[in-house]
Amino acid sequence: MLTFVVFLICAASSVSASAKGAAAGPRLNNNQLYKFSYTTEVLVDRVRGSKEGSAGYKISSDVNVNLVWRDQTNKDDQLIQLAISNLRIEPVSPRSEKKNILHGSTTKSILGKNKLAALTKPFLVHLKNGKAKAFYSYRSEPATVKNLKRGLASLLQVQLSTGKVVENDVSGRCTVEYKAVKGQVTRTKNLETCKTEETGFTTHSKVLGVSRKASSVTVFTLENGFIRSAEAEETHSLAVNARRSVAAKVVSKQSLKLVGTEAGPLEAAGKDAAAVVKSMDTKLAAVGIAAEKVKSECKGCPSLFEHWQAEKKQLEPESLSKARAPRSFLALIQTIRKAPKDEILKVLKSASKTSLPQVVDAVTSSQTSESLDAMLEFLNFTDAKGLVLQERFLYACGFASHPNERMLQALLDISKGKIGSTDIKESVVIIMGALVHKLCQKGGCKLPTVEQVKKMILNGPDSTTVESEVQMYLLALKNSLLPEAIPIFTKYAESEVGAYSTIALTALQRYDVNLMTSEVKQTVNRVYHQNRRIYEKNVRAAAADVILSSNPTYMEVKNLLLSIGNLPHEMNKYMLSKIQDILRFQMPASKVLRHAMKDMISHNYDRFAKVGSSSAFSGFMAQSSDLTSTYSLDILYSGSGILRRSNMNIFGATNEAMLHGLQVAIEAQGLESLIAATPDEGEEDLESFAGMSALLFDIQLRPVTFFKGYSDLMSKMFSMTGDPMNVVKGLILLSDHSEVIQLQSGLKASAEFQGGLAIDISGGMEISLWYRESKTSVNNRGALVITGNVTVDMDFLRAGVEVSFDTEASLDFITTVQFSEYPFLVCMQMDKSTFPVSE
């Protein structure tokens, strides 16, 4: 046993000695100068573009490399000097003289005397076991110069054994995988793991967002323990999820090739690398291998006010249905993001009365601290006359692509202060719910302001007996989608007030199916089947929607089918249409529905031959490989032929996510007295009311009331013009993606993708007692523009690519009912114009 132990110790010692003798990284020889040729190039283009059609530039130079110092106890601990010379700058692809902006230029005229001198100054890198421990250069050098040097120094960093490590280089701190085969090492960098100081932002919605792919591979060829060649290629591509052909890429390449060697300087003596550097030049400093931020100045760019003067005609109301409006809106946002508060206020104060609401949209959507300060100073929430501008500000906050805690705090402060308009007070609280949801999505649920607002809206419904205030808090909770709100919605689903029940049930439908507990499902089923009390038809219809969209069980579906025939006239027809629509459109509940309908008791002619005018219908608006857009129109009438509920929805879905793009719901009640008709069961004592509620891009907006009460109804009847009432009008920043891409060569690419929507949604209800006819309309007008820019800016040279897509659309839903006799006549129209697309 003792002999065996001694043998193991000896074997371990020999292995250890062998490992210790092997090189961990490239080793330089003393008294030798390594002469390299080095090129780095960058090109930007469409994703499917060719090199000939791309834009970009190539920097070529000679590089001399020599050993300055080595630790005598560790041969892999080396201080290396690099010196760039013979610099040349040219386009990345051949161009004619006319198209070549660099034709006739010299490197000195492009770079400038100071930058050229800085680039050709020698710099040092401290390598230990093949890893960069320190990078030494001059602090006074421009950031672009230091970053280019860092890109070159990072090419010397290589591990000679196979394995996965985390290492620092010009790209930041990244996970890197090495694969070593005889004489060759392949380095693959996982760019998703790279941590840098510069962070961007992106849209919370995956449907409207941007997806990106990135790869970085470097192949090293080694000879006599040192690098013979290094070839690196890095690609970043970005595409708009809803239309992947709107995409751009940036490709960066580096090539380092050993040309020859000659006698070089001798090693310097010294205790450590830092001491040797100090003895060489006291101005040399360890400035870090990771790239530093580059401040780019826009030379000759117009000021915000000058830009506004050029764009203001495009932001007048008459242009809002044209693509030029959102295009100008997006361009203005970019300028506002760089502008100080005073300049923003100057534009707000100089805008015409008609264009000012669109300026408010742009300033709020910019989401900078300066733009928020400008808006808070400009708006006076104690003045009820400023309702339009105040609401546009609030809606722009609700649609914010990357809101922060400060924006939520600003709205909380407004809600605690004096507000001149009740409508604005409601909108502030409702929009706060939307901001809570977005901040929680980003992991900010525990922020102090978020916690404060959560507490306020969760306690809100039970803190007041005023009906409008209870509705306000319920709508805020509906926007927040807080799991803690589910018990509140479950409680209010069984409320005696129909409006509370409808909000609660439509809110429950928005939650993830996995959060629908048995208790919630039992409550919703009780409402539909009226186990405890009689409910209005629209409440029962909302309960049916929740049941059918929440993975219903066989018994839930069977009970729904058995209820048909025992419901009020029009409710029977509505439920039949709903079930047939689910089967025809192959919605998730269709499978269990087909299973339940095999039972002849629940599926027979007596049940499925009920007549009426209510309906539910879904269809495709547009289908492509990237995005599928669907619409649905549900209409429920009272037994007397007057509209009870009209619900129009538009959804957008990609392979990964779904977006509720639009919902416009029109509700009416208590109108039977107008035509001396008998109200349906449970609706005998309802107050006369008609109103409209809109949900836009997953954000519930403040409902609009057409009339409330008999006296209000009569006054509106005689003054009714038939013109639609505006629900939402303005410019919305749909998607917003911004990032700085740090390339391994030391260059930086900035990527900006924005989507802007000009929208005008209106709805109306018209009743003619003389002709015994009612008409409801929902009118949608819109123009969408998506732009993407990828730019590589070196301060002295700039290359970029822009991709864009735009379309204009209009969609009208008109329903006309003649109720002079039963069955009443119904005409439903959907007027959809062609969608011209420009890319």
Image (cartoon, rainbow, N blue to C red):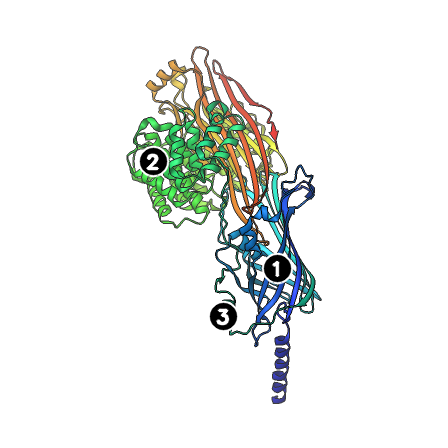
Please tell me whether mark 2 sits on a helix, a strand or a loop: helix
Q: What residue sits 30% from the left and 29% below the top?
A: 383
Tag 3: amino acid: Ala
Q: Which residue is the site of mark 2?
A: 377
Tag 1: amino acid: Leu
Q: Quadrant of residue 229?
A: bottom right
Q: Which residue is the site of mark 3?
A: 275
Question: Looking at this rendering, what residue extends furthest in the bottom direction?
Answer: 2
Nearer to the camera, 649 or 136: 136
Residue 206, image x, y percentages = 53, 42
Q: In the drawing, what numbered circle is on residue 775?
A: none
Give the alpha-carbon distance from disc 3 to disc 1, as whole Å.
25 Å
Question: Looking at this rendering, what residue extends furthest in the top direction?
Answer: 770
Question: Looking at this rendering, what residue extends furthest in the right direction?
Answer: 182
Q: Quadrant of residue 260?
A: bottom right
Please tell me whether mark 1 sits on a helix, a strand or a loop: loop
Q: Quadrant of residue 153?
A: bottom right
Residue 466, image x, y percentages = 30, 33
Give the alpha-carbon distance from disc 1 to disc 2, as whole Å.
52 Å
Please state which of the two labelled residues, at mark 3 or mark 1, is closer to the viewer: 3
